[in-house]
Amino acid sequence: MLKVLKFGGTSVGTLDRIQNVANIIKKIRDEGHDVIAVVSAMSGETNKLIEYAEYYSKTPKLDEIDMLLSSGERVTSALLSIALNEMGLKATSMSGREAGIVTDNAHTKARIEHIDTTGMKKAIKEGNIIIVAGFQGVVQDSLRVSTLGRGGSDLTAVAIAGAIEADVCEIYTDVDGIYTTDPRIEPKAKKLEKISYDEMLELASLGAKVLQNRSVEMAKKLNVNLVSRSSFTPEVEGTLITKEENIMEKPVVSGIALDKNQVRVGMYGVTDRPGIASAIFTALADANINVDMIVQTVGVDGKTDLDFTIPKTDWEICKTVMEKFRPETENIDYNEKICKVSIVGVGMKSHTGVASKAFTALANENINIRIISTSEIKISMIIDEKYAELAVRALHEAYDLDK
């Protein structure tokens, strides 16, 4: 079996932790598997390199930033390879270029275009464990180093697993799998054995931080079986993220997600004319503001009300954009003391009463719902932030997720 393993910054944060990763790889190797390991930079290393660059310039050339930041992962890959060789195993480190990862030329946020697996296949055939520096590739035309942006090492691992047709891609973090909700909020949270790509995508987009959206999307596209597990408790089975049809019993609700990074924008008394919504949301899109939930009331006397939510990080930019629409609006209001709580589950497709159970659970706790948004496998609700954790626990209990 060929396994692609990915180890994040906390897993390789110190020399002792790199040794721990080497021990994990040795155990997997001793079980008879071929191994490609993808590594992040040691925790804190990337931020330190950014600070070094900013010492000279607040706006350095992006290709130089890529050259700088990509060094962090190469350091880790070389150190891990040295540790493995010292243990009597045959290992070789590879940069993104040597691993055959070719990207577009969008420096600091490049996208993988293709992977030439010839070099990796040759190294495996020669009996090597391969340690790939994650987060990076090479631009085809210029041959300059490129980096993949946030979650780039996860993306590297999934892309390699798909290109080389690995049997599984295991993502090692400091968490031993995907839970029904955050165990810090609800101690009764249970670790899931399996979850579908679509459920994981919803949970990731709704605030669950274990896996990045881009890596799950790519895993679904390339049909790569993902496993989320911990490098600190490698003996514990993780959570398998796979196709929906591979999950025999589909639970009605798989998890509860909480996102406190929300601001509600209320536009009241907006001129109710054709194209006003288009103008507002085009302006927000042009400012790269991600709009989430949207509610518009029925127009009365030529006026309408419009509510939507945005990330708190975009709040100040949003205020600037909204000023353009003051002449057509009676009032614009912002509320940052809100949060979004969501329930996710593929079983919603075939079960009735899922939404009413959620609304009843919150009503029983005297929690008022401000905005509701639904999809085929998700129900999201905006509530006051002070009720965030109470809402999570109430919903977790309502759907018997602690059973």
Image: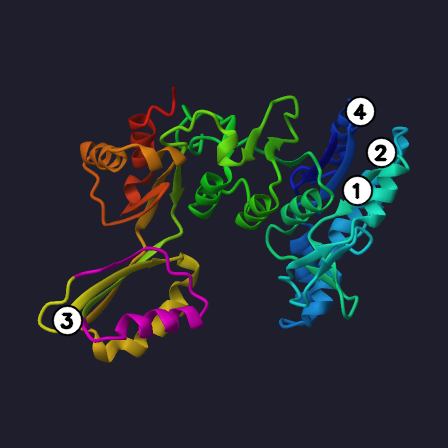
Circles 1 and 3 in contact, beta carbons < 8 Å: no
Is mark 1 in CB contact (under 8 Å) with mark 2? yes
The residue closer to the viewer here, 85 or 248, is 248
Q: Is residue 13 above or below residue 107?
A: above
Camera-near label (2 vs 4) is: 4
| Dot 2 or dot 3, earlier in sequence | 2
Tell me whether the residue at label 4 lies in contact with that at label 3, contact meaning CB atoms closer than 8 angstroms: no
Q: Which residue is mark 4?
A: 32
Three-letter residue code for mark 1 = Ile
**Residue 280 image point, x, y percent:** 32, 72
- For the N terminus, the image quarter is top right
Residue behind mark 3: 303
- Magenta segment, which residues? 270-297
Q: Which residue is mark 2?
A: 84
Looking at the image, residue 303 sits to the left or right of residue 312; the answer is left
Q: Quadrant of the C terminus?
A: top left
Q: Is residue 259 rendered to the left or right of residue 145?
A: left
Q: At 70% across and 65% down in the image, what residue appears?
A: 65
Q: Which mark is residue 131?
A: 1
- Picture residue at 76% right of the left edge, 39% below the top: 36
230 with respect to 35 (left or right): left
Give the percent coordinates (x, y) of residue 392. Answer: 34, 35
